[in-house]
Amino acid sequence: MRDQNTSHFSSLATPGDSEESRRVSQKFFGFWNTLIVLVTTFGSFTIPFSLVHQDPNTIFYYREAILTLLFGLDIVFSRNRLKANHSVQLFEITILRSYYKRWLFLDIIAAIPFALFFPFPILEYLRFFKLVKVVYLAFILARTHIHLSNTLLVAQVLYWTMLLAHWCSCGWLYIRGMAGNVTTSDYIEALYWTVATLTSVGYGDIVPATDTERIYTVVTMILGYSLMGYLIGAVAGILSKKNPTWEKYQQNLEQLTNATRHAQLPLDLQQRIHAYFLYKMERGFGYDESSFIKELPQGLRAEVSLHFRQEIIEEVPLFKDAPDEFILEVAQHLAEHIIPAGDYIFKVGDPGDKMYFISRGEVSVYNDTLKTPIAALKAGDYFGEISLFNDIPRTATAKAHTYCHLYSLDKDLFKNIFDRFPNVQAKIFNKAEIRRKKG
């Protein structure tokens, strides 16, 4: 059933080119972009270090060959990807086009092995222009994987902090005249000085001795202040992104506290209300998705509703083999309910105004005696349809046996939708008749 219903989502949400082709392309470029970031990082670490540690010529030539080959291929692959834009999300297309319109010349410069043709080691640093591409890739990743945005922000802070500390360490070794004779201990000492200076700690055990060293120290301190400002801004940005579920839980607790003070609610009732709020928070039900959906155009609203209701659609056998149009219609109009254990969903004689679908939990159905359940319903079942088909009050009582996550379809919407899909209506009607006769 899961595979069957999953096809509804792929067929409705992905028009155009084949899903398999899109998936393969996304995986390849995901791997390729990761490789480019790693190679760029490798160059960003090894090139400055070669300034103070004389590498053998073979290492220099291998590094130049690898960077030239991969950076050149990256230009070709990225340009071809933009031409075959069926495999690229619209947002990613916009960002990549903007990048290549403004910064393509930097990619080209970074791919040319100037240091092989001219005897100036500083020309190797032109490879650093590729870091602009790393910034763009990080931006795309953060916008296309929004749920990872905070994690990615922390990763970027650590990435640039490590790069900056390494660069400053290599620079410190160079201006102190230690180029060519650097040991591991020398580098660790330089890294220690860099971190102490960048963080403005400055223990004073390693001090600049010449004007050049003092000027370099001042520049490093300024960079440190800028870095600290960026770190504080990043942390403040993360903290300002409130978790809507947690925020709603806190609001509910505050309202419960005020209600308790005002109306002197019994302790047992307070605990039951708190347990209800806690259940909703732990399962992420505090987010108001309806207001988000209302802001979307009709086409996007249908697809988003479909994905929000994916769990219940996959659970309910009724939706198996149902037309895609029917599933789309129902998904947009399902209302969500959380019912605590022991609460009545409806009782005998109540107006029949909704049909219910069970996503999680168990529901017990009773006749008017309320003694022994005549039916025990679980996830994937539906109930309440008898009153809607016959336009009569409730003929049974439904009670939540456990905490229940339900979806309901309003009576008017029920008739409007099912009248247009007679095959589905007949399936529900037959089951309703069997239940009515048993009841």
Image (cartoon, rainbow, N blue to C red):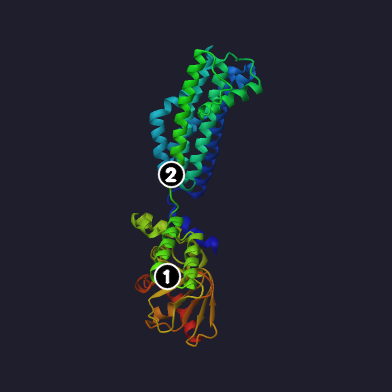
Say whether residue 329 is left or right of residue 378. Answer: left
Which comes before the other along the chain, label 2 or label 1?
Answer: 2
The answer to whether residue 293 shows anywhere in this view is yes
Look at label 1 and name its amino acid: Ser
Q: Which residue is mark 1?
A: 408
- How many numbered discs, if any? 2
Foreground pick, 15 / 273: 273
Circle 1 — which element?
strand
Q: Residue placed at 52% from the left, 62% from the top?
A: 4
The residue labelled by disc 2 is 89
How many C-alpha atoms fall within 10 Å of the one at disc 2: few (<14), some, or many (≥20)?
few
Could you say whether the residue bearing mark 2 is in a helix, strand or loop? Answer: loop
Quadrant where the N terminus lies? bottom right
Task: Assess whether mark 1 and mark 2 are in contact (beta carbons under 8 angstroms).
Answer: no
Q: Is residue 364 depicted above or below 144 in this figure?
A: below
Q: Nearer the viewer, residue 184 or 107?
A: 184
Q: Label 2, label 1: how many angstroms apart (C-alpha)?
A: 34 Å
- Percent across and percent down for residue 152 are 50, 41
Q: Position of residue 399 (x, y in %)?
A: 49, 77
Q: Position of residue 11 (x, y in %)?
A: 46, 56
- The residue carrying pointer 1 sits among few (fewer than 14), some (14 to 19) or many (20 or more) residues within 10 Å by Cα, namely many
Vertical side of 85 occupied by 408: above or below: below
Could you tell me which residue is drawn at 48 percent across and 25 percent down?
A: 221
Residue 195 occupies which quadrant of the picture?
A: top right
Q: Is residue 69 visible?
A: no
What's under tag 2, amino acid-wise?
Gln
